[in-house]
């Protein structure tokens, strides 16, 4: 679990954003990674930091368009105005999409200068499905973890738990389940 003190420290931003450090949130779907990332982003904005939140697939597509238009460097430079770029759901990007190496270029450009917060369902060992080649996968991971806080959120899915509770929920008492009355 993530402690309240740790979240408060991350939300202040002073100890990590000024140094270009990263935050990596891992865990299964429904564990609250995206929710925590969004909450931290909002708290950081309230504390005066500039934050950009996006689904990783959306940003990769935009960067791919910029590459095709020979404008990738300018697109990455525009992201430099943000102290923190939050990439939500990295594991849903796959190298089957056209040239995800733009993601590596973003990571490299921000390395040790600007911070990134990344949420992912998959551990590092599965990131070879994101980047086009093993060397790029290792290089991306190396840059991200060099100055990073890594939080593993291995908890039961909130959505699953809610669905089970709803199914078990109070419902109607058995005596009201049919149109027959108790007098029968």
Image (cartoon, rainbow, N blue to C red):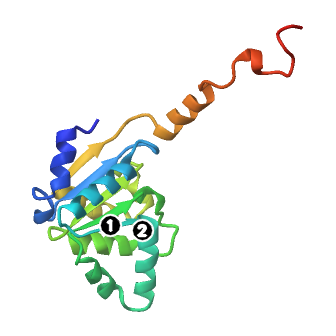
Q: Is residue 149 shown above or below 79?
A: above
Quadrant for the C terminus in the image: top right
Residue under the point 18% across and 47% down: 8
Give the alpha-carbon distance from disc 1 to disc 2, as whole Å: 7 Å
Helix, strand or loop at mark 1: helix
Which residue, as the protein is rendered here, is positioned at the far top?
183
Q: Which percent across, then down, holds residue 7? A: 22, 46
Q: Is residue 69 shown above or below 46?
A: below
Mark 1 packing: few (<14 Cα in 10 Å), some, or many (20+)?
A: some
Q: Is residue 143 visible?
A: no
Residue under the point 23% across and 77% down: 80
Residue under the point 45% across and 88% down: 68
Q: Are marks 1 and 2 in contact (CB under 8 Å)?
A: yes
Q: Is residue 101 shown above or below 124?
A: below
Q: Which percent across, then down, holds residue 29? A: 46, 45
Residue under the point 31% across and 49% down: 25
Quadrant for the N terminus in the image: top left
Helix, strand or loop at mark 2: loop
The mark found on residue 132 in the picture is 2
Q: Which percent across, then down, holds residue 177? A: 77, 21
Query: For residue 163, what is the image quadrant?
Result: top right
* Residue at image mark 1: 136
Which residue, as the protein is rendered here, is positioned at the far front?
183
Q: Is residue 163 visible?
A: yes
Query: For residue 144, what is the image quadrant?
Result: bottom left
């Amino acid at each position: 679990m993530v402690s309240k003190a740790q979240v408060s420290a991350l939300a202040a931003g002073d100890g990590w954003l000024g140094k270009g450090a990263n935050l990596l949130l891992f865990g299964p779907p429904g564990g609250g990674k995206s929710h925590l990332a969004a909450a931290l982003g909002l708290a950081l904005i309230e504390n005066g930091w500039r934050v950009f939140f996006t689904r990783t697939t959306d940003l990769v597509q935009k960067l791919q368009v910029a590459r095709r238009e020979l404008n990738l460097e300018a697109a990455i430079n525009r992201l430099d105005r943000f102290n923190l770029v939050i990439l939500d759901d990295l594991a849903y990007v796959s190298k089957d999409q056209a040239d995800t190496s733009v993601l590596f270029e973003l990571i490299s450009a921000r390395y040790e200068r600007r911070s990134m917060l990344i949420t992912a369902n998959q551990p590092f060992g599965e990131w070879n499905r994101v980047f086009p080649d093993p060397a790029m996968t290792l290089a991306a991971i190396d840059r991200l973890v060099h100055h990073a806080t890594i939080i593993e959120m291995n908890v039961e899915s909130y959505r699953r738990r809610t669905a089970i509770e709803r199914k078990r929920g109070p419902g109607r008492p058995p005596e009201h389940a049919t149109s027959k009355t108790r007098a029968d």
